[in-house]
Image (tube, helix red, strand yellow):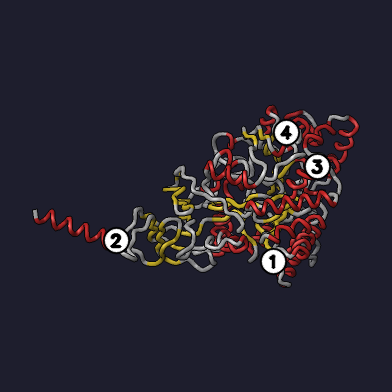
Amino acid sequence: MMGRWWRAVVVWVGLLAACSPGREPFDLLIMGGTVYDGTGAPGQGTDVGIRGDRIADMGDLSGAPAARVIDATGKAVAPGFIDMHAHSELSLIVDGRALSKVMQGVTTELLGESGSAAPILLPATDEGRVHEDLGITADWSTFAEYFERLERQGVSVNVMSTVGSGRLREAVVGNTDRAATAQELERMKELVATAMEDGAVGLSSGLIYVPNRYASTEELVELARVAVGYGGFYATHMRDEADDLVAGVEEAVRIGREARTPVHIFHFKYSGTRSTRVHEVSPFRQAVEIVEAARAGDQDVYADVYPYLASSSTLLLRLPEWSHEGGGAQVAARLRDPETRERIRREVVEHLARGIPAGTPETVLLSRTAFPDHQRYLGMTMGEIADAMGTEPADAILELVERAEGRVGAIYFGIRDEDLRLALGLPWTSVGSDGAALAPEGVLARGHPHPRAYGTFPRVIARYVRELDVLTMEEAIHKMTGLPASQLGLAGRGVLTPGSQADVVVFDPVAFRDRATFEDPHQLAEGVEALIVNGQLVVDRGVHTGRKPGRVLRRR
């Protein structure tokens, strides 16, 4: 009898001690891992205690009470990764689990670029609202409504978004190749202000796409100034990333200088054709020098990079620019006019005959199409598709574009390895996937996407840390965490320190790798043992828990 009583006292005293000041149990306790805190400092052995949605304590926490202990022995522990360039606006509506991203260790995504989720207003075309391939119709017009929709249904990652210049032009000017009137410019500025008040974090542009490309530098400066007034920044898919890359960087820097705003360059790369002679500076190195000169002059310019030698975009890029006006449906209509089709065909033939990287039938791969009968060609090159069709590559391209009403995508192989290594090693570049949050089953498994949607972050570590030694582990993690957090103004995220937000990834530093390939892209990454978003386990023992604790991170 006395023994049972004494044991009860011991239990009671233990519970009392655990609940006394300084001894409150942790909700999660990560023990025995090597912590990379996101600052770029080398990893060190320490424990991480989480209470609620915050890091409560770090250090030697052995013996501390916790509702759940994660044994991270032999594992790396880091802040959750921040994807600085994502296209998950619609896929998160379809499936809020963000499966392809969380299995890479991603806890926060920056959305936007040219086709941001909002505003969707007349005279915007149905391309901005109806998405038959995903089975959804946008039931929002503003960012306030879009963000409310995300929060209502739940997402597994945190979300931020810029407002895209393409959406602004589509809503006010339409897809017409002309300058905005003074009245139209004022209306677009009003829409930027509304987006920022709703929580957008800046203005973005995709200047190779219709109708973004019709915006002048001066127009973009005016719009960016509005975003700056709310503490925002300017992000851009530049007007040219090929032979006029230098001019594209100069324009981006100019917009930042005149609008007095930080500038973020999406997927910093060179995919042009110019060869360099001995002692001649390559176009990409020239672009780097322009950015570094601006930074030396106290201008805040930075960029993101993805670790692949191929890009992905619309197949319309292989048609002459003049044919793009009005959007995909108008392009298809032009192709149905025999005289116009022949004119377009001649220019496509001339382009393919130049033999440039990402511009030959062998270096362009079909990634998506809205035309069901052509989906059998997904993952094939334009040359292979032409053979299957029994026609010439130029004719195959026109057929793909026309039948899909312009809703057709391609992967382009044309980035040089030396440029990629240089870009990754720059101290001001972060990591961005340029991909949507997908899943290897269901609606989101349709198409043949670029493998970056599934493998960007583990590939940086597997190939450019472990295999090629381009970066150290702490440098790579800093580019995925603390650096982008500081660029986005995310106080309390991107670093592991007591009081910071509990976005944490635990991964195997040896087994963490990408499995997605250009041949078989719908494959989840391996090596993430646990992923914690705002204090809740989203991935546990390598499996998605189904939890959706992500938040919309609005500009404050």
Marks 4 & 1, CB-CB < 8 Å contact:
no
Residue depth check, mark 3 versus mark 4: number of the one nearer the observer: 3
Q: Nearer the viewer, mark 4 or mark 2?
A: 2
First in sequence, mark 4 or 1: give its number.
1
Tell me the residue that label 2 is attached to.
18
Picture residue at 78% right of the left edge, 49% below the top: 187
Q: For the point 71% across and 63% down, which residue is it?
A: 261
Q: Which class describes the residues within 10 Å of circle 2: few (<14), some (14-19), or many (20+)? A: some
- Kind of residue sitting beneath label 2: Ala
Label count reads 4
Q: Position of residue 322 (x, y in %)?
A: 86, 43
Q: Position of residue 347 (x, y in %)?
A: 86, 41
Residue type (three-letter) at the residue carrying disc 3: Asn
Mark 3 neighbour class, 10 Å CA radius: few under 14, some 14 to 19, many 20 or more: many
Q: Nearer the viewer, mark 1 or mark 3?
A: 3
Instruction: State which mark lies toward you, 2 or 1.
Output: 2
C-alpha span from label 1 to label 3: 32 Å
**If you read the primary sequence from the N terminus, does the residue marked by circle 2 or circle 3 appear first?**
2
Q: Is residue 423 above or below residue 359?
A: below
- Any mark on residue 175, and which? 3
The residue identified by callout 4 is 385
As measured in the structure, the alpha-carbon distance from the residue carrying label 2 to the one carrying label 1 is: 48 Å
Which three-letter amino acid code belongs to the residue tagged 1?
Asp
What residue is pinned by disc 1?
A: 300
Mark sitting on residue 491: none
Q: Residue furthest left?
A: 1
